Image (tube, grey):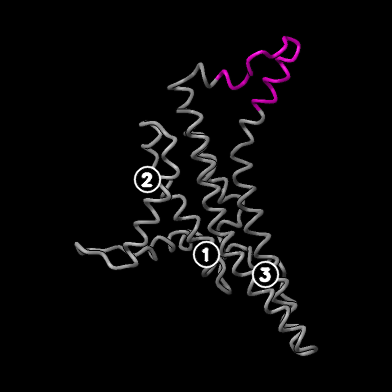
């Protein structure tokens, strides 16, 4: 009960060396692969989900945008597996670190924007000034649109960090309350424990939804620039 509420968000170390890199590289090892011509049910279900997700995200893209399909599918799988592993007790979730999420968001956003300026520079510049804008408002709108463009990767990273962190904190608080009430009032403990189970199910859904939202927004940024 005296444990620091934010202790689970501290980057772990092994012999004084940061272990975050090993934790980030661990989720891809859990994805099963098959060496056989006929796949089992797990591999077949996995391939079906990947095809369904990539089809839903890539339908709106042209040929140039679809070249990002492998990157986007890898991104959603990585974020989803990392979020789900972070729900295990005494585990570390890299996506609760803003620096980690910024490291994913900024390069992807910058790549999409640079591609837009290289291939469709007129359309890219047209986003800074909506058609029919009164002349006195032109400087202000250009500044506002520039700020809204530059803040996109920050919004991506903060959204993912805030949602994952909030869920972990809430689970920690309710779990601590369940442990404290177990020696005081058993009926109340059962009620709080039921709430904890429902919250865990909700957090599993949030872990998958946040991975999809992050990847979908990157896909939309790409669509606007291709």
**Are circles 3 and 2 on residues that touch, CB within 8 Å?**
no
Q: Residues within 10 Å of mark 2 (few under 14, many from 20)?
A: few
Choose the circle earlier in sequence order: 1 or 3. 1
Q: Residue furthest right?
A: 184
Residue 70 badge:
2
Residue 171 badge:
3
Pick the front one: 53 or 156 = 53
Q: Secondary structure at mark 3?
A: helix
Q: Secondary structure at mark 2?
A: helix
Pick the front one: 149 or 199 = 199
Residue appearing at x 60%, y 51% in the figure: 160
Pick the front one: 27 or 207 = 207
Q: Measure how far apart labels 3 and 2 are at the Cα level.
A: 34 Å
Left/right placement of residue 214 relative to residue 155 reads left
Q: Which segment did they paint magenta?
A: 125-146
Residue pointed to by mark 1: 84
- Predominant secondary structure, magenta span: helix
Residue appearing at x 45%, y 28% in the figure: 226
- The image shows residue 6, relative to residue 190, as above or below, that is above
Q: Looking at the rendering, which quadrant does residue 10 occupy?
A: bottom right
Choose the circle earlier in sequence order: 1 or 2. 2
In magenta segment, residue 131: yes
């Amino acid at each position: 009960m005296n444990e620091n509420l934010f202790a689970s968000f501290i980057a772990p170390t092994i012999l004084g060396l940061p272990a975050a890199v090993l934790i980030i590289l661990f989720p891809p090892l859990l994805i099963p692969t098959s060496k056989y011509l006929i796949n089992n049910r797990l591999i077949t279900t996995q391939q079906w989900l990947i095809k369904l997700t990539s089809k839903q995200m890539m339908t709106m893209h042209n040929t140039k945008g679809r070249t990002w399909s492998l990157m986007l599918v890898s991104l959603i799988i990585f974020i989803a597996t990392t979020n789900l592993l972070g729900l295990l007790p005494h585990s570390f979730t890299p996506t609760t670190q803003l620096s980690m999420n910024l490291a994913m968001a900024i390069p992807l956003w910058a790549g999409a924007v640079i591609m837009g300026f290289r291939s469709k520079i007129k359309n890219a510049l047209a986003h800074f000034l909506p058609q029919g804008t009164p002349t006195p408002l032109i400087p202000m709108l250009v500044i506002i649109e520039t700020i809204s463009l530059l803040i996109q990767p920050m919004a991506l990273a903060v959204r993912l960090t805030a949602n994952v962190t909030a869920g972990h904190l809430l689970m920690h608080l309710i779990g601590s309350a369940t442990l404290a009430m177990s020696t005081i009032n058993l009926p109340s403990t059962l009620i709080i424990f039921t709430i904890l189970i429902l919250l865990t199910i909700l957090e599993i859904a949030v872990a998958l939804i946040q991975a999809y939202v992050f990847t979908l927004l990157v896909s939309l940024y790409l669509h606007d620039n291709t």
